[in-house]
Image: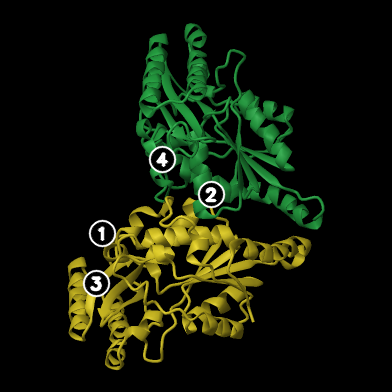
Chain colours: A green, B yellow
Amino acid sequence: MPIIHHHISALRTALQPYRDQKNIEQSNLQRIALVPTMGNLHEGHLELVRIAKQHADIVVVSIFVNPTQFGAGEDFDSYPRTLDEDVAKLATVDADFVFAPSIDEMYPVLPPPTSVRAGAITAQLCGQSRLGHFDGVGIVVSKLFNIVQPDIAVFGQKDYQQLAIIKQLVRDLSYPIDIIGAPIVRANDGLALSSRNQYLSASERQIAPVLHQELQHLAHQLTSSKLSQQEADSLLAQTQTRINEAGFTVDYLEIKTDELNDITESAAFNTENKNLIILVAAWLGRARLLDNQLVAVNRPL
Amino acid sequence: MPIIHHHISALRTALQPYRDQKNIEQSNLQRIALVPTMGNLHEGHLELVRIAKQHADIVVVSIFVNPTQFGAGEDFDSYPRTLDEDVAKLATVDADFVFAPSIDEMYPVLPPPTSVRAGAITAQLCGQSRLGHFDGVGIVVSKLFNIVQPDIAVFGQKDYQQLAIIKQLVRDLSYPIDIIGAPIVRANDGLALSSRNQYLSASERQIAPVLHQELQHLAHQLTSSKLSQQEADSLLAQTQTRINEAGFTVDYLEIKTDELNDITESAAFNTENKNLIILVAAWLGRARLLDNQLVAVNRPL
């Protein structure tokens, strides 16, 4: 079973011996990995831990429903908290430590006066409908990096914009941490796993895989023939219509470069080896679902 | 002589063995201290290194004229760069490492998209006349903390607002770093040492100690009798007039709590053991001089 710590100082003390061993056995480096989560763990999270274990010797999983990344009217209060079940699941993948702090432990002053903002990359996509969300991500991830001081950190690609923001934050703030993006884990019918899937009714759950199917279909269309920007825009609009007609309310559906830059005419769809990504956020009942699909343009997926 | 590194990766590699020794010799902890500077070192900086040496085994002095903390029209281009002399001076106080990166090394993208802002505390005092200054301080200090990963860092109390901001940043971002504020080092005539003092003409240099003398005089007035807020405001205005009449142009002259909160009527001057601080910024010729004076109200200084 992983060892649970609720206090920053206790976690730091517990990790110190592993930092020591890093140095004593130079031939067998002890690396520490961080897997930040909000708990209510599913197979996607467990896969993050397995990947972390491949790159490090000690894996710390943080479980913290971070209030600063929820906006007014969002699901902070109702977000599922299942610490005991989470710890039992983490035991099955050999996580070493769980860091489950209280809000007071993380934020002696709430909201914290200091902000960590990744700039323009946060203003688009989820940043447009969730004002302040990525500010909350910025500060909590900075704190977790400073608390755990890991060698690597693993984040899921389902939250693709979050992953891109964290990579930029690590570059701009010179954190000595390798960031690893883990592939999306899906249910058998293709739905990307998410704690928020449990907000879906039985009938909504039947509809939900449409999101992934439509992104796959669009990705195929984008790669199967040379397209003008206008033709691609038209396909994008048709896809959005079909997703809405299936019962969703699309928040955004966009095509970006894999670094989340806009696609301009000059960097058009037909550039060989240009990696693009289709990103979607859509409401289905009271669940806001995210998905994305990488597209290697002009080459078979 | 201290060992000079210009690259982040080389400095990290050089520091790693000392982190090892920290663990191997548990009875004799090896602590790493950071002293961030913009170079052009004077006795005030050397005192920071001496204090760092008292608290740590290894002292890293960074020398970097940080472009992001200079505003348009400020003295970034003319700020004195004297690396060889600086290194020679650091040898006399047994500094272990000098980190002197290029601008490209620190900012592969300039300006960096990511910002680290300490909030309301930055909006007052120097933050009002130097827009963006403390954003530049926030990002460069965050980077230096992540590059050096020190156990302690030493900053001068002459830049009192900067010190307060960094303490808040360390608290809000959970950096495992003890911040030490070092007392102001003064010339024999009382002028606080500063690299910018060399901008003063000979006659301006004669006038410059007035700043410290007036703060001392005001501090004495504040502590020698019970004062109403109005009486204190009147003394403050008289002090500002005298400083201006001596040849300065006062940017600001204010009394704050020692945590840089406003003094309200409810937290008046006569509270026993209430620590206040008088802060001033004033132009003399082309030099913008800072000084401050702590005041233990109702007790002799």
Furthest residue to the top? A203
**Residue carrying label 2:** A170
* B298 lies above or below A109: below
Q: Nearer the viewer, mark 2 or mark 1?
A: 2
Which residue type does callout 1 highlight?
Thr
Query: What residue sits 69% from the left and 67% below the top?
Result: B30
Provide the secondary structure element on which disc 2 rests: helix
Task: Tell me the quadrant of the picture where the C terminus of chain A can be found.
Answer: top right
Q: Chain of mark 4?
A: A
Q: Nearer the viewer, residue B258 or B150?
A: B150
Q: Nearer the viewer, mark 4 or mark 3?
A: 4
Query: What residue sits 72% from the left and 53% below the top?
Result: A19
Residue B113's x, y, as percent?
42, 50
Residue A54's x, y, as percent?
73, 38
Q: Chain of mark 3?
A: B
Find residue B24 and report its image quarter: bottom right
Q: Nearer the viewer, residue B283 or B47?
A: B283
Q: Is disc 4 surrounded by few (<14), some (14 to 19) or many (20+) residues within 10 Å? A: many
Are callouts 1 and 3 both on one chain? Answer: yes
**Residue carrying label 1:** B264
**Residue carrying label 3:** B251
Which residue type does callout 3 highlight?
Asp
Q: Chain of mark 1?
A: B
Which residue type does callout 2 highlight?
Val
Residue B179's x, y, as percent?
52, 64
Q: Chain of mark 2?
A: A
Q: Residue A122 shows which numbered tag? A: 4
Query: What residue sits 38% from the left and 16% below the top?
Result: A238
Mark 2 → mark 3, Cα distance in angstroms? 37 Å
